[in-house]
Image (tube, helix red, strand yellow):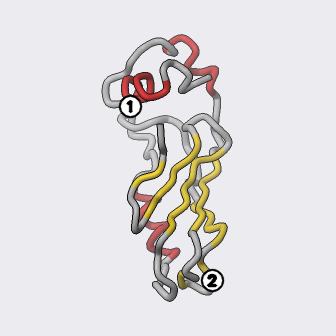
Amino acid sequence: MKNTFGSALALTIFGESHGRAIGGVLDGMAAGVPVDEAFIAACMDRRRARGDGLSTPRVEADRVQLLSGVVNGHTTGTAIALMIENQNTRSGDYAKTADLLRPGHADYTAYAKYHGFQDA
C-alpha cells in the first residue's frame, strides 16, 4: 500500500498521530516558487485545538519544519521535505479504545489498509 499520491507533482506522507513526527516529501515542484512560511504557520494555527470542549484536548505547537527544498523563501527544484514533531504523544490514553472504530476518525480506513497493524 502506497503513501505517495500524484505523478508529475508527488506527495509522500509519513508518520502516525501518536508517533514522534508526521511529515511529507513533495517532489516535482519547480525552482523559484515563493514559499510563505508565515502563511503556512497561520494555516496551522487555524487547525489548532482551542480547548473548547469540541476539539482534542491535546495541545501542540504544530510547527512545520522545512527540512529541504526551500532556501531563502523559494523552492530550489529539489524535493521539499517537511516535518511536524508530535510533542504530546500519550498512546496509553487510548488503550481502552484501541479496538473501537471511532466516528469522525480514519480508524476503519487505517484498519482496512494496514490489516490491524496501523497502531503496532
Name which residue type carries label 1: Ala
**Residue tagged by mark 2?**
71
* SS under mark 1: loop
Front-most of residues 79 and 95: 79
Which quarter of the figure is the C terminus placed in? top right
Q: Residue at x 35, y 35 (%)?
A: 54
The amino acid on which the numbered mark 2 sits, given as a three-letter code, is Val
Examine the rendered structure and indicate whether residue 116 appears above or below residue 39: above
User: Where is mark 1, residue-wise?
Assistant: 106
Residue found at x 38% / y 18%: 101
Tell me residue 70's x, y (percent): 59, 78
Label 2: which secondary element? strand
For the view shown, which residue lies furthest in the left direction?
103
Q: Position of residue 114 (x, y in %)?
A: 49, 26
Q: Position of residue 104 (x, y in %)?
A: 32, 30
Compare marks 1 and 2 and give the one earlier in the sequence.
2
Q: How many marks?
A: 2
Q: Between 119 and 36, which is closer to the camera in this rendering?
A: 119
* In the rendered image, the vertical position of residue 67 relative to residue 13, given as above or below: below
In the image, which disc is placed on residue 24? none
